[in-house]
Amino acid sequence: MRVTVYREAHFNAAHRLYRKDWSDAKNQNIFGKCSYPHYHGHNYDLEVGVTGTPDPETGFVINLDILKTIIKEEVEDYFDHKNLNIDIPEFENTVPSAENIAILIWNRIRKVLHPDLDLKIRLYETRRNFVEYDGN
Amino acid sequence: MRVTVYREAHFNAAHRLYRKDWSDAKNQNIFGKCSYPHYHGHNYDLEVGVTGTPDPETGFVINLDILKTIIKEEVEDYFDHKNLNIDIPEFENTVPSAENIAILIWNRIRKVLHPDLDLKIRLYETRRNFVEYDGN
Amino acid sequence: MRVTVYREAHFNAAHRLYRKDWSDAKNQNIFGKCSYPHYHGHNYDLEVGVTGTPDPETGFVINLDILKTIIKEEVEDYFDHKNLNIDIPEFENTVPSAENIAILIWNRIRKVLHPDLDLKIRLYETRRNFVEYDGN
Amino acid sequence: MRVTVYREAHFNAAHRLYRKDWSDAKNQNIFGKCSYPHYHGHNYDLEVGVTGTPDPETGFVINLDILKTIIKEEVEDYFDHKNLNIDIPEFENTVPSAENIAILIWNRIRKVLHPDLDLKIRLYETRRNFVEYDGN
Amino acid sequence: MRVTVYREAHFNAAHRLYRKDWSDAKNQNIFGKCSYPHYHGHNYDLEVGVTGTPDPETGFVINLDILKTIIKEEVEDYFDHKNLNIDIPEFENTVPSAENIAILIWNRIRKVLHPDLDLKIRLYETRRNFVEYDGN
Amino acid sequence: MRVTVYREAHFNAAHRLYRKDWSDAKNQNIFGKCSYPHYHGHNYDLEVGVTGTPDPETGFVINLDILKTIIKEEVEDYFDHKNLNIDIPEFENTVPSAENIAILIWNRIRKVLHPDLDLKIRLYETRRNFVEYDGN
């Protein structure tokens, strides 16, 4: 009897899609206006889903206070009001696409989550563009 | 060729997270302000998902009028404007966490749904906290 | 040149619409299921709008940190996870309708807000029922 | 390492649920007000989910410009501001239920999508009624 | 001390923007795809705002049950699942633009609303296009 | 008989709240994490409201195609995927607060809008913070 508990979180960040090893023309051709040199930004909305068996005493898959602390420490403190290209070392040579941000968030939460719990995340870059990742 | 049809529903209820067999201090420690003695409440938003093969004549997995009636009888009439701790017998000795409410709703709908149809639900306790359950 | 700045907040509370000086039948007749004896509850969503002239140096009508503190102290700490009928003295003999809750919130914020600033609020009891009050 | 990328799209269309080979009474009985003779309509909201492995260079499962073009050509140009019963040949003898519209959309996108990518869609007929289909 | 109470409602309808006294070319030129001959449709979302002084006994500007009945009789029964051009006599020679639908809805509610109460409405044709009217 | 027509638009931008003529400590003290040196960003959602008398022939206060063109040229082309501090000359010495962005947007639309039409805008910096400006 496994239930998934979701908690929504938010962070605001600047980013730019481009590769140093590509010409400006190629960056513009592949990434369009997302490669503009002075960055743009998003309100990232994150849904963190944790799957497990509810504890018979508390009725909780995971205490939300614990999940909120994990999200604060691993996601909000790390990404909020940051420039993803400059401030996040994992994106020094990797494009901070929504896909890659989602994989990085998943890895950061996964390493501190109890191994009996499964994890999946959904990351909204805008209301109309979003990605999902569950580690598979 | 299986399609999932979702219908959204709502109910408002009061509840309190606490266990009679725990001290007030332990209830406060584990459940925080959710254990306040005089109850608080939520607008619960429910998504009921029913999976099956569309009928070739009607194009319906399930006629929405039938699904609405099931949701009204099994969920809204049972939970709406109720106090979950006092008015719902299943929560006399069980914490009405979102997880446990979702499991109870799933069981109530499952027992009246045609066995060829699969069922999953998502229950929003707030816009930022929600749970999913599909019987597995 | 006056701009209105809005900040959204949330609180969860239980309540019941009824009057002690009315019979149960009259309460049921006027307030319907909202008068059920064991309370029900809502996720209240609040929009606080503050109107004023932006400061030429900061570009702010009001620093959001100040507004957030006011909302926390005057609204969230006072109403969140409370039973409006039992825990809020203003509702000992007054029905905690959305209208009356909105007026009380407006009065609480108004008394600590700088007199040069205007105030209006919108309070959602559910997604489909909400009220507005601006002190007039 | 497979990630799902979603893009939201919209179209407005008129439709009517009825079968020519049924009597008016039977249409009314099964489809209710959805069978009214002069059509009604919806703002259809569509989520298109494409699953694949992010390209190591771009970080993209699929370039969103490509996905937007596919959605424009296969969905928006085909359905937007149309009468589903009259203008869409696939619904000449098939009821344009949300289920059947979703299957048709899925088939139209599937045939132009790279075979390494998986596809699922969610179609909202209203905010409270929606369907999902992933080809299985 | 005047408070505005809002209630949200919905209806689905088909319509077409065109004038019989214009050529097809002029209709197409002015109304674009909204003039397509076989109609398209929308989920219309309506917010009805009623302003007045809360009753000291009930705390209500207007009992929501009364407001819901007015909206059902004057709006939903009249517009839901209808073709605005064919089924609504007021649009026989008037374009059913969002503006004109809003004015018609306002007039229908105004005539049955207590004269001490003020009325304003907001009508969403889509999530991104909406209109407001308050009788002035 | 004046109706207000709203159109929603979006743009993504990076910005930073700080003043060159203040010390880093003062910027940090007043603007908090919004002053981080490498910028952060937002999905700005904009509602543009235009008030006027519907044209008796078309039923339009303003043809939405005209309004969309104005918004594209004056707002989206000017702000989308830009760095507000670096790319927008009006913010060279002015803090790009939500208030100041709203005033700039209002001025840009006002100068190209027909003088018989009134204008007001609402700008969402996040779902929970937004501002309104109508030129007064």
Image (cartoon, coloured by chain):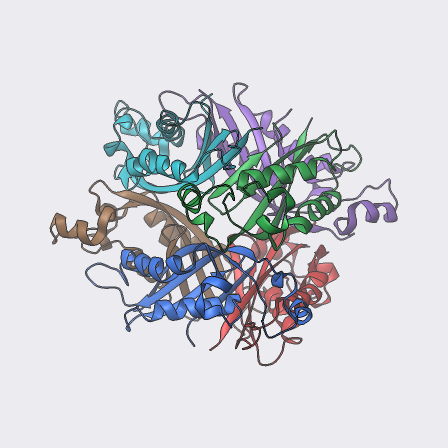
Chain colours: A red, B blue, C green, D brown, E cyan, F purple
User: In the image, is F121 to the left or to the right of A39?
Assistant: left
Residue C121: image x %, image y %?
Answer: 61, 37
- Would you place residue F83 above or below residue B96 in this image? above
Res. C96 visible in picture: yes
Res. B127 visible in picture: no
Q: Residue visible at 47% across and 20% down?
A: E136
Which is nearer the eye, E57 or B28? E57
User: In the image, is C130 to the left or to the right of C54?
Assistant: left
Which is nearer the eye, A55 or C86? C86
- Would you place residue C92 above or below residue D58 in this image? above
User: In the image, is D135 to the left or to the right of C35?
Assistant: left
Residue D72: image x %, image y %?
Answer: 41, 51
Q: Quadrant of residue D116?
A: bottom left
Which is nearer the eye, A96 or B9? B9
Q: Quadrant of residue D30?
A: bottom left
Residue B131: image x %, image y %?
Answer: 50, 66
- Which quarter shows the N terminus of chain E? top right
- Would you place residue E69 above or below residue B48 in this image? above
How many marks do you count on the picture? 0
